[in-house]
Image: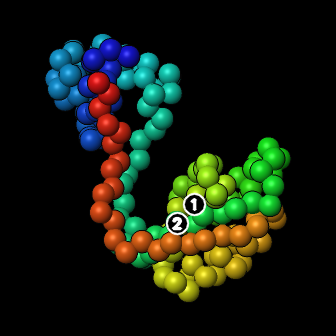
Amino acid sequence: MDAIDHKIVSVLQDEGRIKMAELSEKVGLSPTPCARRVAMLEEAGVITGYSARVDQAKLGLQVTIFVAVELERQSRDALLAFEKAVRRFDQVMECYLMTGTRDILLRVVARDLTDFDRFLEERLMCVPGIRNTRSSFTLRTMIARNALPHSS
């Protein structure tokens, strides 16, 4: 990736619905070569898709919870089985394999504490192989970025 590709990615992170003519103007290319570069970035997997950012609170999802999960075993099969199970839970927004005392970190959204309790009891704790969990509730979001940092 050269400087123009980085600029294209930067602009698209901020303005995903920008018209190609505007994008090409911002990055200093004519529309055809700019469109070609965007297509190449998509084919290379640098640009993985386009989506709308939504306000979770306005959709009734008032609570964000981080759930640290310790598995009974850390074998490849156990990790794959856990991942497959939590992929079905649309409340799980992100799932990370971690180092340290917890094996997995989940970011979960819920309408309220009762909704989260239901998710925990009826869904997450039904996943085989969990030794224990620890939940931390967010009080407020201090920083939320959707764009990756510019590479130097």
Return the residue nearer the eye: 82 or 69: 69
The residue that disc 1 covers is 106
C-alpha separation, residue under disc 2 versus residue under disc 1:
6 Å
Count residues near mark 2 (Cα–Cα under 10 Å), then give few for <14, some for 14-19, many for 20+: some
Which of the image's four quarters has the C terminus? top left
**124 lies left or right of 13:** right
Q: Secondary structure at mark 2?
A: strand
Residue 90 visible in the displayed image: no
The residue that disc 2 covers is 66
Q: Is residue 96 above or below residue 5?
A: below
**88 lies left or right of 7:** right
Q: Quadrant of residue 150?
A: top left
Residue at coordinates 32% horizontally, 37% vertically from top-left?
149
Residue at coordinates 57% horizontally, 60% vertically from top-left?
106
Return the residue nearer the eye: 73 or 25: 73
Q: Are marks 2 and 1 in contact (CB under 8 Å)?
A: yes
Place of residue 146 in the rendered image (x, y in percent of width and height, measured from the top left):
35, 48
Residue 138 visible in the displayed image: yes
Q: Secondary structure at mark 1?
A: strand
Q: Amino acid at mark 1?
A: Leu
Q: Which mark is residue 71?
A: none
Q: Please, which residue is most extreme toward the front here?
A: 101
Is tag 2's residue or tag 1's residue first in the polypeptide sequence?
Answer: 2
**7 lies left or right of 43:** left
Place of residue 93 in the rendered image (x, y in percent of width and height, measured from the top left):
53, 59
Residue at coordinates 43% horizontally, 31% vertically from top-left?
47
Which of the image's four quarters has the N terminus? top left
Q: Amino acid at mark 2?
A: Phe
Return the residue nearer the eye: 23 or 61: 61
Label tally: 2
Return the residue nearer the eye: 139 or 48: 139
Q: Is residue 62 above or below residue 84?
A: below
